């Protein structure tokens, strides 16, 4: 086996990765434009990409749409923050105390597969509609990625490091805070990043199903039931939701690389 075979492939730079993604987005938009303009799809149901983007730009100047967007972002941010505040300590507890983990495993495994969307009517009956309705569902849906990533991170902590600290007389809490929590922090950050996408989906989905109040989902709902349906408005709203999700994910990935550059996963990605 020669040296050339052993040399790992050099990873693409951030600029190269972003340029490739931009090219993919442009090609996708051009395909939509072509399909709509040539009549392969009815423009009434699939407007050209230029019309969708143009409508998305004009919506920024609409105070009503800005209110919808800020309401959705508020519910998303509050729900994600509450989920992190609950899931991280709970994950540390379950991951550190096997007895509690075993006692609660059946309950956790029962609740985790329940689709959050299926709980929309129940939560509406219990706590009503509005901001609290969306936040509750976002918390429920976002809890699981953070919880399981926290527990997974704790299982990967080096036992030698923990035993070394115990040998110097440190108690369980000190070992948790000084070794276990810092070692599992990259996994917790990944869980938060995954939960951010789930929270965004649940926020908009809840608003669409509820069909009342304010939010981007409510804006999309009323554009869909209009006669005729305002497809440009619907897809423009979807465009802003997708763009926000991409930006949040990019920011969280950059924060992970900066904060956890010492972690083996980040070192491997950086080459």
Image (cartoon, helix red, strand yellow):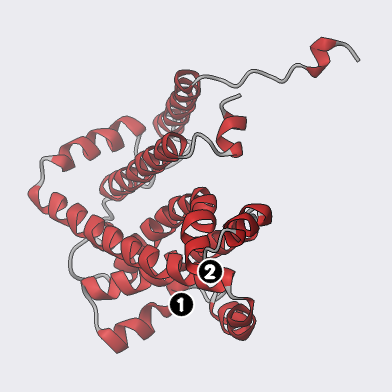
Q: Does 256 appear above or below 189? A: above
Quadrant where the image shows the C terminus:
top right
Question: Could you tell me if residue 223 is visible in this image?
Answer: no
- Looking at the image, the residue that sits furthest to the right is 1
Please determine whether, in this image, residue 47 is positioned above or below residue 241.
Answer: above
Q: Do the residues labelled 2 and 1 touch (CB within 8 Å)?
A: no
Q: Which part of the image, by quadrant, shows the N terminus?
A: top right
**Residue at horizontal 39 percent and vertical 63 percent from the top:** 84
Residue in the foreground of this view, choosing between 60 and 39: 60
Q: Residue at x 48, y 63 (%)?
A: 174
Q: Which residue is drawn at 42% across and 39% down?
A: 259
Q: Give above or below for 65 relative to 37.
A: below
Left or right: 77, with 97 as reference point = left
10 Å crowding of disc 1: few (<14), some (14-19), many (20+)? few
Residue 80 in the image: state x and y as whole percent. Answer: 35, 61
| Residue 198: % across, % down | 44, 58
Rendered image quadrant of residue 162: bottom right
Q: Residue furthest front?
A: 168
- Could you classify mark 2 by the number of other residues whose Cα lies within 10 Å: few (under 14), some (14-19), or many (20 or more)? few
Residue at 22%, 71% (x, y): give it. 131
Q: Is mark 2 on a helix, strand or loop?
A: helix
Judged from this view, the residue extending furthest toward the left is 63
- The residue that mark 1 highlights is 118
Of mark 2 and mark 1, the one earlier in the sequence is: 1
Q: Which of 92 and 269 is in front in this view?
A: 92
Task: Please provide percent x and percent y for residue 120.
Answer: 37, 77
Is residue 219 rendered to the left or right of residue 47? Answer: left
Viewer-side residue, 153 vs 122? 153
Q: Mark 2 points at which residue?
A: 172
Residue 47 image offset from top left, x and y in percent: 34, 39
Q: Nearer the viewer, residue 244 or 253?
A: 253
| Spatial separation of the CA atoms under disc 2 and disc 1 | 40 Å
């Amino acid at each position: 086996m020669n040296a050339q075979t052993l040399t790992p492939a050099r990873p693409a730079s951030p600029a190269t990765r972003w340029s490739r993604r931009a090219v993919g987005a442009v090609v996708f938009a051009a395909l939509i434009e072509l399909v709509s303009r040539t009549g392969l799809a009815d423009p009434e149901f699939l407007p050209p990409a230029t019309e969708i983007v143009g409508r998305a730009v004009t919506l920024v100047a609409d105070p009503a749409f800005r209110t919808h967007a800020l309401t959705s972002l508020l519910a998303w941010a509050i729900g994600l923050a509450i989920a992190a505040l609950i899931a991280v300590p709970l994950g540390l507890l379950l991951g550190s105390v096997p007895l509690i983990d075993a006692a609660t495993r059946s309950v956790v495994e029962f609740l985790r597969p329940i689709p959050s969307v299926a709980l929309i009517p129940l939560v509406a009956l219990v706590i009503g509609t509005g901001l609290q309705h969306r936040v509750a569902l976002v918390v429920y849906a976002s809890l699981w990625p953070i919880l399981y990533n926290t527990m997974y991170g704790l299982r990967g902590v080096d036992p030698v490091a923990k035993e070394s600290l115990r040998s110097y007389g440190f108690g369980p809490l000190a070992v948790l805070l000084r070794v276990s929590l810092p070692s599992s922090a990259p996994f917790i950050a990944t869980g938060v990043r995954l939960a951010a996408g789930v929270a965004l989906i649940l926020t908009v989905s809840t608003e669409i199903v509820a069909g009342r109040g304010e939010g981007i989902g409510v804006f999309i709902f009323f554009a869909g039931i209009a006669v005729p349906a305002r497809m440009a408005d619907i897809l423009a709203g979807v465009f802003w939701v997708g763009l926000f999700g991409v930006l949040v994910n990019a920011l969280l990935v950059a924060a992970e690389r900066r904060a956890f550059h010492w972690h083996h996963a980040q070192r491997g990605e950086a080459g």
